[in-house]
């Protein structure tokens, strides 16, 4: 794997398994043969972790004898959230067979560096396996990682044998887990694929209808901002409603647009996006701890009562209480271009990023 650097200075270990040919695992399994998994280097160290949750600090040496799955995540990432039901289920199913799952939480947004947020959200999401808190990107750099989510799997001798970036390939990943456990002499391993029951943000995207991209609101990464030419960046300004084309967004009311977020300055401010997807999500949170800020959600100018997401009630209302990803829209009928709006009934919300599913 080109993104993993083998440290030539590491203490000599066992010779790497000699197996040719990458990514023929699924073909060989279907043919009744053992998969031919490549050797991608040593399992890097976790010394860069700033804290550990659910475990004492772990090391490659201490993990010898177990198959190790390392899952890079950050709790607002919708792509990772949709993989979580599988990782969580694998951790439980194969724990007694010799699998160790380690979640490496490397933050994208500044508030994801706050340990209290990581603790709270890992509990809310049912992440019970060990978590290396990677707020300074030390573990990320050790793996030469570039993606959320990213999965790396090492065998019982500490050799990396497989990686996958992004969503999907769940059957392939599980078959690699099973094969490495079997190679290590594991017995009584259930070789049926896991079945998951995702809810809310964990439900897979409707890829057939998804035509809207992840979109950031802070000017440092923003795309599709219809008022970009007239915006007062890093200063409070009053914005008027404008017409939007597909995948454009706009503000109305009083806002401050900063490098990383758009901040609601006065009650009644609105944020609009013309999108094409089943689901619409927004990464947001209160600027002040313990605040609870009410909002209303609209589709095509009407309250989105019939298409509300899991963070919105049947009256199309909700509250911003935590810094996280909120599912605001989940449509049940045919998907077409729709105009989404959210109205904040009080000031003090920071909006970071739209995602879709």
Image (tube, rainbow, N blue to C red):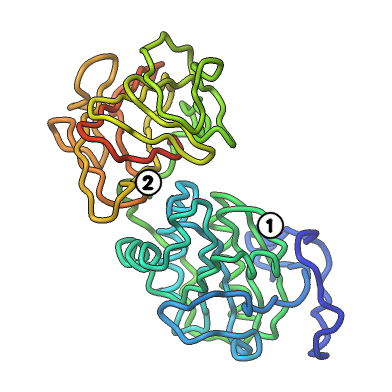
Secondary structure of the residue carrying numbered label 2: strand
Above/below status of 280 relative to 15: above
User: Looking at the rendered structure, which numbered label has been put on residue 325?
Assistant: 2
Q: Position of residue 200 (x, y in %)?
A: 31, 46
| Tag of residue 236 | none
- Compare marks 2 and 1 and give the one earlier in the sequence: 1
Residue 68 is drawn in which quadrant?
bottom right
> Which is nearer the eye, 175 or 90?
90
In this view, the residue in front, 64 or 219, is 219
The residue closer to the viewer here, 219 or 95, is 219
Residue 347 picture location, percent across and down: 26, 36
Mark 2, residues whose alpha carbon is within 10 Å: few (<14), some, or many (≥20)?
many
| Category of crowding for the residue at label 1, using alpha-carbon neighbours closer than 10 angstroms: few (below 14), some (14–19), many (at least 20) | some
Give the labeled residue for mark 1: 27
* Residue closest to the far top: 243
Rendered position, 325 above or below 47:
above
Q: Quadrant of the N terminus?
A: bottom right
Q: In the rendered image, which quarter contains the C terminus? A: top left
Residue occupying image coordinates x 40% and y 79%? 54
């Amino acid at each position: 794997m080109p993104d993993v650097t083998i440290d030539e200075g590491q203490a000599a270990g066992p010779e790497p398994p000699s197996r040719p040919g990458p990514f023929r695992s699924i073909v060989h399994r279907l043919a009744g043969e053992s998969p031919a998994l490549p050797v991608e280097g040593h399992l890097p160290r976790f010394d860069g972790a700033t804290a550990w949750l659910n475990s004492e600090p772990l090391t490659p040496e201490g993990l010898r004898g177990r198959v190790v799955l390392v899952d890079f995540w950050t709790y607002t990432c919708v792509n990772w959230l949709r993989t979580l039901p599988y990782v969580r289920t694998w951790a439980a199913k194969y724990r007694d067979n010799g699998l160790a799952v380690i979640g490496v939480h490397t933050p994208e947004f500044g508030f994801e560096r706050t340990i209290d947020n990581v603790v709270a959200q890992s509990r809310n999401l049912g992440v019970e396996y060990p978590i290396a808190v990677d707020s300074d990107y030390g573990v990320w750099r050790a793996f030469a990682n570039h993606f959320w989510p990213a999965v790396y799997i090492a065998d019982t001798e500490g050799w990396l044998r497989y990686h996958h970036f992004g969503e999907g390939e769940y059957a392939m990943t599980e078959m690699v887990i099973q094969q490495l456990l079997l190679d290590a002499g594991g017995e009584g391993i259930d070789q049926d694929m896991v079945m998951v029951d995702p809810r809310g943000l964990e439900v897979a995207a409707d890829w057939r209808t998804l035509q809207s991209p992840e979109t950031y609101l802070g000017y440092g990464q923003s795309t599709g901002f219809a008022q970009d030419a007239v915006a007062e960046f890093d200063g409070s300004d009053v914005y008027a409603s404008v017409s939007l084309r597909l995948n454009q967004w706009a503000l109305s009311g009083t806002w401050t647009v900063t490098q990383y977020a758009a901040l609601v300055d006065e009650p009644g401010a609105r944020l609009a996006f013309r999108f094409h997807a089943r689901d619409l999500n927004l990464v947001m949170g209160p600027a002040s701890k313990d605040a609870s800020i009410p909002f209303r959600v609209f589709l095509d100018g009407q309250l989105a009562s019939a298409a509300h997401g899991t963070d919105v009630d049947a009256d199309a209302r909700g509250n911003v209480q935590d810094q996280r990803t909120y599912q605001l829209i989940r449509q049940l009928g045919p998907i077409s271009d729709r105009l989404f709006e959210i109205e904040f009934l009080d000031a003090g919300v920071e909006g970071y990023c739209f995602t879709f599913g």
